[in-house]
């Protein structure tokens, strides 16, 4: 028997990737599965971005780059942060990684250790929890409720802070709830953090996927003092349909960025040279494709929310950002089918896959067992057909 490290046994595989893989395996067996699991845009990467990568190959940009990323891309990131977020950074305050997930992983490794506490609002993105656990720190989960729009309240944050609190991980627009914090709400949280040595990791990956006239802001943008202790994490995956290219980045205090760079130098070295040139074009090039994608996401969101709320026993809040819905299905708990009783979100997700050929993610993986998550980064046709199937499967419950 191979002996694995105790460190690796503290974490679990990403449930969203696992369900997506299972749905794909069933599809390969010939089952007509409609997947609402995937956390990635279904659009193709825009042509002008692809062409930038082709040009990079032709020009021979196929070698190692600086560990923290090419200067051209770092300058484009600095330009983006100034243009979109009115935040000023130096080159030494920016590091490019192999996707925002890698950026976040590196941050948890260089910042946290045994005995530290890291505040994670719930429902949370699945990986925050495991990354914090792997660092040795203790995740402190702050439960939010739908009635508060799935947002943490200042009193709640205040109550969670101890002498061991090292950081809080913020994610707005949120995966899985789609909740978007307003500048006023963030300023109130900033007041609680004022004067404390607590870092903020602001995962802004869904910054551009926002609806209903909501304006994106992060805590660095509303509180000058907190800004000095904030690390912004962002990337090109979601905004430009570039999940496979693996480019993410962090901007924040120089010592933290230097530590992340040191860690990268000993594991991944640089992010892919070609993908960096594509990301540069994504940030500096024409932005029309973003608007087209967001408009399409908005149409899909309206359809999926309406169809979900039409199913008796399902209640879905209108999310203002990202491309997920997080409906409450708890009033179906206790109902039964030929295979057993549905007692929680995992039972319900398993029932839908089995009886409706529809893949969704149980909310328990995001820290809330009353809900399920559906990604609407799939065609309207799939949404309409998938929701019909869910509705009919719910009607068959007794
Ligand atoms: C998708 C996602 C990421 C990671 O994106 P990368 O593809 O690794 O850049 C980070 N945070 C959240 C909340 C996400 O949904």
Image (spheres, rainbow, N blue to C red):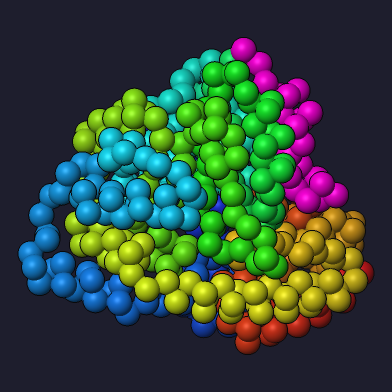
| Magenta highlight range | 141-163
Position of 54 with respect to 258 (left or right) is left
For the point 24% across and 76% down, which residue is it? 51
Quadrant in the rendering for residue 259: top left
Position of 371 with respect to 170 (left or right) is right
Q: Is residue 146 magenta?
A: yes
- 296 shown above or below 172: below
Does residue 327 show up?
yes
Which quarter of the rendering shows the N terminus?
A: top left
For the point 84% across and 64% down, which residue is it? 315
x and y percentages locating residue 331 in the rendered image: 90, 58
x and y percentages locating residue 349 in the rendered image: 70, 62
Which quarter of the rendering shows the C terminus?
A: bottom right
For the point 12% across and 60% down, which residue is it? 62
Position of 230 with respect to 122 (left or right) is left
Question: 311 or 151: which is nearer to us?
Answer: 151
- 395 shown above or below 325: below
- 338 shown above or below 143: below
Does residue 33 show up?
no
- 42 shown above or below 147: below
Question: 260 or 17: which is nearer to us?
Answer: 260
Position of 270 with respect to 282 (left or right) is left
Question: 162 or 320: which is nearer to us?
Answer: 320
For the point 38% across and 36% down, which residue is it? 106
Q: Is residue 198 magenta?
A: no
x and y percentages locating residue 319 in the rendered image: 71, 62
Name the residue furthest left. 60
x and y percentages locating residue 127 in the rendered image: 52, 44
């Amino acid at each position: 028997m191979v002996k694995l490290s105790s460190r690796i046994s503290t974490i679990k595989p990403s449930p969203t990737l696992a369900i997506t893989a299972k749905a794909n395996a069933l599809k390969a067996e010939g089952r007509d599965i409609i997947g609402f699991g995937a956390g990635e845009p279904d659009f193709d990467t825009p042509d002008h971005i692809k062409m930038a990568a082709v040009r990079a190959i032709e020009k021979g940009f196929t070698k190692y780059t600086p560990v923290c990323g090419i200067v051209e891309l770092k300058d484009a990131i600095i330009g983006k942060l100034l243009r979109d977020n009115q935040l000023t950074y130096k080159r030494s305050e920016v590091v490019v990684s192999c996707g925002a997930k890698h950026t976040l992983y590196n941050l948890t490794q260089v910042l946290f250790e045994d005995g530290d506490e890291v505040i994670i609002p719930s429902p949370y993105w699945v990986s925050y929890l495991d990354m914090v656990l792997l660092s040795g720190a203790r995740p402190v989960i702050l439960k939010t409720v739908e009635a508060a729009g799935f947002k943490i309240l200042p009193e709640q944050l205040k109550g969670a802070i101890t002498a061991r609190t090292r950081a809080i991980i913020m994610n707005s627009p949120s995966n899985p709830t789609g909740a978007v914090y307003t500048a006023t709400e963030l300023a109130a949280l900033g007041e609680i953090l004022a004067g404390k040595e607590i870092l903020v990791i602001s995962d802004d990956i869904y910054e551009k996927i926002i609806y209903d006239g909501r304006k994106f802001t992060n805590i660095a943008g509303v509180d000058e003092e907190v800004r000095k202790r904030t690390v912004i994490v962002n990337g090109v995956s979601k905004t430009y349909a570039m999940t496979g290219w693996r480019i993410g980045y962090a901007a924040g205090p120089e010592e933290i960025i230097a530590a992340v760079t040191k860690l990268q130098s000993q594991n991944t070295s640089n992010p892919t040279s070609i993908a960096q040139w594509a990301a540069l074009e994504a940030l500096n090039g024409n932005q029309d494709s973003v608007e087209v994608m967001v408009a399409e996401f908005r149409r899909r969101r309206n359809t999926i929310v309406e169809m979900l709320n039409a199913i008796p026993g399902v209640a879905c809040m209108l999310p203002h950002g990202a491309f997920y819905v997080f409906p409450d299905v708890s009033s179906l708990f206790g109902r039964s089918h030929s295979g057993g009783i549905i007692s929680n979100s995992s039972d319900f997700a398993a029932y839908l896959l089995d009886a409706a050929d529809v893949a969704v993610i149980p909310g328990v993986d995001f820290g809330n067992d009353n809900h399920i998550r559906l990604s609407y980064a799939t065609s309207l046709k799939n949404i309409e057909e998938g929701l019909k199937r869910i509705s009919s499967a719910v009607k068959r419950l007794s």
